[in-house]
Structure formats: structure tokens, C-alpha cells
Amino acid sequence: MALMDFIKKQFIDIIQWTEDDGETMAWRFPMAEMEIQNGASLTVRESQMAVFVNEGQIADIFGPGMYKLTTQTLPVLTYLKNWDKLFESPFKSDVYFFSTRQKLDRKWGTPNPVTIRDKDFGMVRLRAFGIYAFHLTDPKAFHTTISGTLESYTAEQLEGQLRNTIVGHISDIFGESGVPFIDMASNQVEFGNALKAKMEPMFQAYGLALDSLNVQNISLPEELQAMLDKRIGVNMMGGMQGYMQFQTAEAIPLAAKNEGGLAGLGAGVGVGFGVGQQVAASMAQALNPAAAPAAASPAPTATPATAVSADEIVATIEKLHGLVGKGMLSQAEFDAKKAELLKKLG
């Protein structure tokens, strides 16, 4: 009885793979020193394919279904082993199962910003991330180029290669599109489609199909985003003049809390206006370099104003207060003008 049990263990009459996870893409049926019984049953479930490999050569490939293994159902293997149609002995062959289940929600992203040339901002650095999905379609190509003779191969092992290749094409897609950064958010679907088309040949070479590829977000690094937010804020306030008025309104309560109140910022109105014009011109030039020549041209000599409004005095106070904070004017200079400023306010 023991001898019969030993003999039975040497032959395989049922070959199947019951997947226990969604990550395994290739799995080798455990053969050890056993042989496959002629007439054995092969079960290939939905979302699976099975491949017989004879001494490193791909032989017969099976899709979903139940099969009785004979010379009729194994024509390629029969040819490779030179079997005749009456051959009924057990045989040895490697059997690999492959999962064709779709691999969803695979994430990709730029670990570091990529640099592109932008129409509005010149050279900018961008970050991008998204998701993609794929599935195995050609087990022969996948076995030959990827999984080989490994006992098993998972999607996680492959994901790094796929993700890095996608990221490597990001700068090409953005650069070739010619779309300014400001408009990229509204073109994410188009970017995803273009990137998918660029990646499909590589997936196909691996025996895979790229089902979808989406760009979910395109952004600037934090420091560049802060600069863009400031520029947007200036534009929303009607340009440089509106921005200066807003800054003045924001600074007046702070100036009033300083030692000496508004009087503590004392300075001549005429001097204040001159400094204020220089500050405004410098800021306008920084935000709009194209206007620099006009801003740099000398202003014509004007007749001094005979009267100054309270609003102008307040605006001058705010500007001079900012200059004190920046060290451009000393507190002593303010104190020297204090009496004169109070008279103007009176």
C-alpha cells in the first residue's frame, strides 16, 4: 500500500490556480519531481490564462475553460516532444498561470518637480500626479520579457518600472503641448490622453494593455505658488494702484498703534510723495518688466501743489511707515518732521 501511495504522488492529474489576492500576475504550478498524467484535467478560470513551457520554449497557451490534456489539446508540446498520436505516458512540463484581471488605481507622480518652458512665466518647475490602470493580454510576451522562470511575479514588482517610465515622459508632454501653466488645469484630460498614447507601445511590449491614464493634478512648488498667488492678488485689485491702496488701508490701523500714533511717523508731505512715487515705480517695474522704460523716463517738472488732501497725507504716512520698517528712513527723521505733519493734518 505504501508503494502504491508513493507512485500516485508522482503524477499530477489536476492542474489549477486559485488566486488568493489581486496582486499576483504570474504563478508557476508546483511540479517538484512530479509528472503530469496523460489525460489530466486543466482548469483555467475567468481572468486567467495558462501556458505550458517545455525546456524554456513557450508551447501551448490556454484561455478560460476546462481541458483534458492529450496530444490533441497539446499540439505544440506534442510537436516539441515528438510524440505520436498514441502516446499516453506521463510527461514533464512547466505550467505557468497568468492573471488577466485589471489592475486598478495604480498611482504615479513626480518625486521632484520637472522644469519646462512656459509662455507666461519663462522657465517653471511643475509637479504632477495621477492614476492609471492596466491588465495582462499576452502571457507569452510577459513571460519572455518580465516574469521568466520566477515562481511568482506581482504587480507591485512591476509598478516601479511602469511609474518611473510614465514620469519620464511628463516633461515631454508638457513641453510639446505649448499650453501655459495657467491653462493646464483645464487641459488635464487632454494631457492624460496624450500621455496614454505615448505609453501604450511600452506596455504592449511587456504583454500589457494600458486601459486608462489620468492626470489628476498639476501644481507649482510651494514657493512658486506663493509668488503666483501674490501676482493674482495684484491683478484682482485692479493692478498696481489698487494694490497700493489696499496695502495702505491695511497698514493704517497698524501705524496708529505705533508709539506716537500717526504723529510718530511725521514727515514732510512733499518728501513723502516723492518717496512714494519711487516705491510705486519700483514695484510696478518688478511686476511688469515691459513697462520699465516708461517708468524709468524722467517725469516733467510740475508746479508744486498748493493744497494736499487728508487722503494723500494718510497714504504718505503709510508709505513712510513702511520705509522706516525697512530701514530706509530713520526714526530721527520722522521725529524732526512730526510738528510739520501735525500741522498738515490740522
Image (cartoon, grey):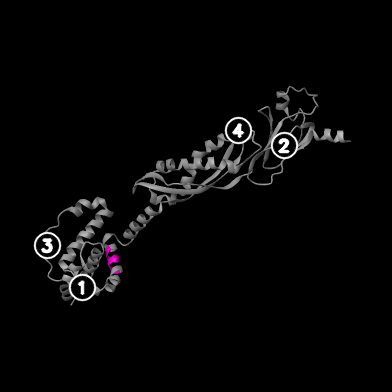
- Residue at horizontal 61%, vertical 44%? 102
Three-letter amino acid code at disc 1?
Ala
Tag of residue 276: none
The residue singled out by tag 3 in the image is 302
Label 4, label 2: how far apart the Cα atoms are = 22 Å
Describe the element under mark 3 as helix, strand or loop. loop
Quadrant of the rendered image containing residue 115: top left
Ranked by sequence position, the earlier of labels 4 and 3 is 4
Three-letter amino acid code at disc 2?
Pro
User: Callout 2 environment at 10 Å: few (<14), some (14 to 19), or many (20+)?
Assistant: few
Ranked by sequence position, the earlier of labels 2 and 3 is 2
Left or right: 67, with 199 as reference point? right
Tag of residue 141: 4
Quadrant of the rendered image containing residue 134: top right
Tag of residue 310: 1
Left or right: 297, with 96 as reference point? left
Ranked by sequence position, the earlier of labels 1 and 2 is 2
Describe the element under mark 4 as helix, strand or loop. helix
User: Callout 3 environment at 10 Å: few (<14), some (14 to 19), or many (20+)?
Assistant: few
Three-letter amino acid code at disc 3?
Ala
Label 2, label 3: how far apart the Cα atoms are = 97 Å
The residue singled out by tag 2 in the image is 30
Label 4, label 3: how far apart the Cα atoms are = 83 Å
Residue 47: give x, y in percent of width and height: 67, 42
Q: Reply yes or no: does residue 338 show up in magenta.
A: no
Ranked by sequence position, the earlier of labels 4 and 1 is 4
Residue range corresponding to the magenta coloring: 244-249
